[in-house]
Image (cartoon, rainbow, N blue to C red):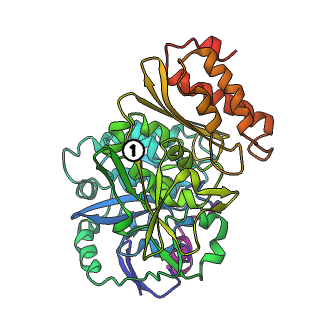
Amino acid sequence: MLRFILNNDDIGTSLPPGMLLLDFIRYHQHLPGTKTGCNEGDCGACTILAGELQEGTMHYRSFTSCLTPLGNVRGKHVVTIEGINLPHSLTAVQYAMQECAATQCGFCSPGFVMSLTGFCLSHKAPTLSNAIAAIDGNICRCTGYKSIERAAARITQILEARNGTTPAQFAAGAQILPDYFVEIPARLAALHSSLESANDVAAQPIGGGTDLYVQQHDALKLKALRFLYDQPALKGIRQENNKCIMGAATTVTELMTSPILQAYFPYLSKYLKKISSTQIRNMATLAGNFVNASPIGDLSIFFLALDATLILSDGQKERELPLRNFFKGYKLLNKSPGEYIRGLWFNLPSQHTLFNFEKVSKRTHLDIASVNTAISITMHYDMIDEIRIAAGGVGPVPLLLKETARFMRGKLMTESLIREASFLLQTEVSPISDARGTEDYKRLLLAQLFKAHFITLFPQLETAILIR
């Protein structure tokens, strides 16, 4: 029996845990406010909130229910648009949307309301930029967004009065949420004491589902699945001496907000905001991005440049494997069928090491890269002591450009060296023409993004010489 709380109702169901949460909400609970849109996590019309107890405090995150397996909400509080309604009036978020004319046809409106309500329940500072970031995974085809931004501005003004009150308590008192939210922590705590483990070690492992459910949602519905998303042993980011170790089920959001990573990568948030949207970042896991084996997997490129090492397990024994040796060919992995990724580690950069990540896609956010690339470079005065360059979208697997790095290692950093290297790297890649661009376009993109690394990291260089 799979148990969780849906809005104000305790749910116990024997339906397949691999079925989509969206289908459960609409067709089994008959709550039509959560819309079926793209079924790929792109439009945000199906946005719900998922809340869980963490050390006695409720934490809510926005999810796209069209990619969320039912098994991933075990023991959580799931909130749909119907679950935030007040008895006799609009909520503060709904009222702001109405007063700012932020809805026209109305199809996308429940998703926007849920994302903004999730922002109200977060611990983020009540700024307009944070409010707008909360709706980066929601698409509206009518309003042009400015009216929605005005509604977001009104909401931030309300939140400025929070003054240390917990988000749920303040939201209930400010007509953002109904009163029952205050009781949810105690109800979840009681529910957790009765939860049963439902993981079959022989079943197919699944993390956040953001890749697999786009491709195989019908096949996964009745399949035996092993849900890894909430397993404590696969969570967490910690530092041991100069080594950073993280669990396989760590989400992109948890990477973005990690104090350890932020200390070593000051522009981390800027890099990771280029990866999908708030809802998908809340769901997508580190290992999931690797085992999907996409040639343009953003996290694969990011961690290749950091020379990360995977920790693989078959449930009985473990082995370590450099990430650079994990990808054997297109969608082929150096992993036996019974193995799963338990975590990874990498050496934290020294004070002389610089890092940068670049990505170009048809849309700035919430899109698959045409080309992405990351670089880690350690300097000894003006000399390149160590360098690693990773690139995606230019071969059958995520690539480490070893020959280009070997050519640059041990040389003085100059504009002419970078230009020479930008020609050499073309011999290491083999892009193909597809929906993301032609072969020539991708080669040009990689050359320009390669130069962008150095323009960003070494502002003293003559940009005009580099881009000639």
Q: Magenta stretch? A: 21-37
Q: Dividing the picture into quarters, in which one does residue 230 lie?
A: bottom left
Seen in the picture, residue 197 relative to 445 is either above or below; the reply is below
* Residue 294 seen: yes
**x and y, in percent, of residue 270 in the image:** 46, 36
What residue is shown with label 1?
347
Tell me the residue at 48%/55% (across/down): 279
Tell me the kind of residue under disc 1. Answer: Asn
Question: Around disc 1, counting alpha carbons within 10 Å, would you say few (fewer than 14), some (14 to 19), or many (20 or more)?
Answer: some
Q: Is residue 443 left or right of residue 75?
A: right
- Of residue 70 and residue 81, the one placed in the foreground of this image is 70
Which residue reaches farthest left?
A: 164
* Residue 284 visible: no
**What residue sits 42% from the left and 72% below the top?**
73
Q: Is residue 451 magenta?
A: no
Q: Horizontally, is 360 left or right of 374 in the view? A: right
Give the camera-side residue of 318 and 468: 318
Instruction: Looking at the picture, tell me which residue is in the foreground, 206 or 101.
Output: 206
- Residue sitting at x 68%, y 21%: 420
Q: Quadrant of the C terminus?
A: top right
Q: Position of residue 108 (x, y in %)?
A: 57, 55
Say whether residue 29 is magenta: yes
Classify residue 191 by image quadrant. bottom left
